Amino acid sequence: MKQPNEPDSTDYMACASCFCLASRQAARKITRLYDSHMQASGIRVTQFTILSQLMLRGEMPIGKLAGILGMERTTLTRNLALLEQRKWISIKPGDDPRSRLIGITAQGRGMVRRGFPYWSKAQAEVGGLLGDDGQAALKVLASRSLE
């Protein structure tokens, strides 16, 4: 262990090429691009993603939805509160009293339909910016378990 008076010889420049930083910067840029396209639809891309997955997959427990989205359960729960407030989702008790089932409502389906053309334009733009290699790399990263 380094003593308080010892000089620090660690090369902190390695932090300049941090993979975590790069992935977060890329994710923020992509999210901003999607949100700029979707602004006129009245829904943010993060909300659209949750609703579209519920529309595609049907009602499910919060834990399963969190896994599909790659989100922490507590983060997802905070996001779901606003969707429930807007009546875009319903939350009801599951078979186990400790679990809750999330489902999309008719209003939520309407928001997905309304947002889809905007999402589609953003998807095409991001796809073009990434190119075929970037799209493939992103899909590989998303499919890998890094734990």
Image (tube, rainbow, N blue to C red):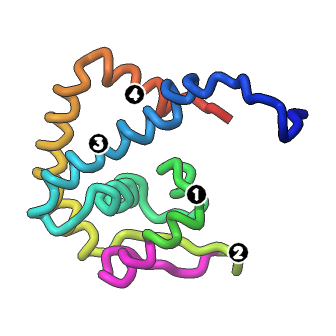
Q: Position of residue 8 (x, y in %)?
A: 74, 29
Return the residue nearer the eye: 9 or 116.
9
> Label 1, label 3: how many angstroms apart (C-alpha)?
21 Å
- N-terminal of the two: label 2 or label 4? 2
Judged by depth in the image, the label closer to the viewer, 2 or 1, is 1
Q: Which residue matches tag 2?
A: 96
- N-terminal of the two: label 4 or label 3? 3
Task: Please give the name of the residue rendered at 34% of the width and 57% of the height, measured from the top-left corner.
Answer: 46
Contact? badges 2 and 4 (CB < 8 Å): no
The disc at residue 72 is 1
User: In the image, what residue type sits under mark 1?
Assistant: Glu
Residue numbers of the magenta segment = 80-94
Contact? badges 2 and 3 (CB < 8 Å): no
> Label 2, label 1: how many angstroms apart (C-alpha)?
20 Å
- N-terminal of the two: label 1 or label 4? 1
Residue 70 is a magenta residue: no
User: In the image, what residue type sits under mark 2?
Assistant: Asp
Q: Which residue lies furthest to the top in this view?
A: 133
Q: Which residue matches tag 4?
A: 138
> Label 1, label 4: how many angstroms apart (C-alpha)?
20 Å
